[in-house]
Image: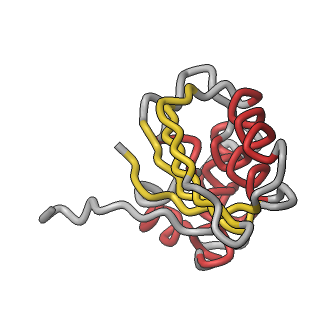
Amino acid sequence: MSDGSKYYVVKEKAVPEVLMKVVEAKRLLETGRAATVQEAADAVGISRSSFYKYKEDIFPFRDNVKGKTFTFLMQMHDEPGLLSDVLHVVAEYRANILTIHQSIPTNGVAMLTLSIEVLPATGDLSNMIETIEAKDGVQYLKILARE
């Protein structure tokens, strides 16, 4: 891709502070809590030039995912009801489950591959992922693919 439009999914803790402030400034402008770019930039503590430099390059995960398919890889304990709990979270966020594949547990740990479709009614995908990761028994969750 010669235009530099390669995308990465990065956890918030790895994103430089200036980029997070650009996201917050954009939110202030979108919600009307700031009337101008200067006002939004001042409110979050960045320069206008920083805002303009990065405004097209960073956006919350939820802003660009509707209509997309995501495949997650999860490592989880082999506990009764844990898979059901994970699927219940997906249902609560109103995502469409396309495929589920769980390996036979080895040493009390199973690998789960889950593909979901993000629908217009689907809630914040970032929050869904955090909710799944917080479940007791889920050791990790990784996004394998986004189509």
Which residue shows up at 59% across the image and 75% down it? 15
| Outermost residue, left side | 2
User: Where on the picture, by quarter, is residue 43?
Assistant: bottom right
| Outermost residue, top side | 121
Which residue shows up at 44% across the image and 58% down it? 144
Colour scheme in use = secondary structure
Which residue shows up at 69% across the image and 35% down it? 90
The spot of residue 62 in percent (x, y) is 58, 42
Above or below for 117 versus 101: above
Which residue shows up at 43% across the image and 37% down it? 69
Q: Which of 121 and 53 is in front in this view?
A: 121
58 relative to 126 in the view: left or right: left
44 relative to 17 in the view: left or right: right
Q: Quadrant of the N terminus?
A: bottom left
Q: Quadrant of the C terminus?
A: top left
User: Where on the picture, by quarter, is residue 18?
Assistant: bottom right
How many badges with numbers are in the image? 0
Q: Which of 56 and 96 is in front in this view?
A: 96
Q: Which of 124 and 40 is in front in this view?
A: 124
The spot of residue 37 in percent (x, y) is 59, 53
The spot of residue 66 in percent (x, y) is 49, 31
Above or below for 94 versus 125: above
The spot of residue 10 in percent (x, y) is 54, 68
User: Where on the picture, by quarter, is residue 81?
Assistant: top right
